[in-house]
Amino acid sequence: MTWPEVAEAVADGATTVILPLGATEQHGPHLPLGTDTIRAAALADRLAERLPDSLVAPALPFGCSDEHSGFPGLLGLDAETLARVILDLARRLAGWGARRLVLLSAHGGNGEALDIALALLRKELPDIGVWANDNLETIAPALLEVARRDGISANAVGLHAGEGETSEMLHLRPELVSMHRCMPGFTGDMEDVLDRLRASGLKPVTASGVLGDPTHATAGRGSRYLNALADDLAAALRGDADGS
Ligand SMILES: [Zn+2]
């Protein structure tokens, strides 16, 4: 957008800004490091289609990804730093008339930074409404419902670079997916392994970096995943606006 386009949109009531939060970290041998950034931007676009009074900011390509230490390619921020970056951006967008900030993270490791950011924003920018998606470390129920209908198990969908993210990437950027390198990673219970992941990162759990089984990924299901997630987020945001 140009600045006059932003000015006009805000004057017409588009005062919600969606900030997609991605990451730069390993996504197995078959997906690019920027997977979460690409997914965050795509999800933000779909959410904006459902919330007409919103604008989409460029996706932040760096998140909190230390659970991927030991895999080359990692770039990330400390939780406090990411929270401060979000606060800095919020100050600027408040300056040209945005009234609500939606923090849309496509990466589970950003949870702590989001908690810090929400506290900072409420204290320092009380006039800006903030909303952040939660349940970052679990597979979203809306997504699991799509998988279940197709006979794909939660453990195949996976928490990271599994069938879920691979299907989404096959839909969004198929030229960046190396399906011939796809292999099942850790396919045990995704809920049970969370404590181990928090304590020691992914490396001891999965040598390839994959949590799930990407081998049955399809672009069509990836599209349905993204739409189901966007529907869910839009409903949550509308509910939030009604309730406050
Ligand atoms: Zn990811």
Image (cartoon, rainbow, N blue to C red):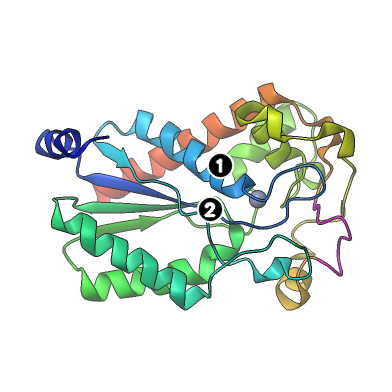
Q: Is residue 24 left or right of residue 231?
A: right
Quarter of the picture containing the N terminus is top left
Q: Which residue sits at x=32%, y=75%? A: 120
Name the residue nearer the viewer: 137 or 71.
71
Q: Position of residue 233 (x, y in %)?
A: 44, 42
User: Which quarter of the figure has residue 132?
Assistant: bottom left
Mark 2 crowd level (few <14, some 14–19, many ≥20, 10 Å Cα) = many
Asked if labels 2 and 1 touch by Cβ distance under 8 angstroms, the answer is yes
The secondary structure type at the circle numbered 2 is loop
Q: Which mark is residue 150?
A: none
Amino acid beneath label 2: Gly
Q: Which residue sits at x=28%, y=38%? A: 54
Q: How would you classify the magenta stretch by its main secondary structure?
A: loop
Q: Which residue sits at x=29%, y=47%? A: 17
Q: In the image, is residue 61 above or below residue 40?
A: below
The secondary structure type at the circle numbered 1 is helix
Quarter of the picture containing the C terminus is bottom left
Q: Which residue sits at x=72%, y=37%? A: 166
Disc 1 designates what residue?
Answer: 38
Disc 2 designates what residue?
Answer: 22
Name the residue nearer the viewer: 87 or 239.
87
Stretch of the chain drawn in magenta: 203-211
Name the residue nearer the viewer: 204 or 232.
204
Name the residue nearer the viewer: 17 or 189.
17
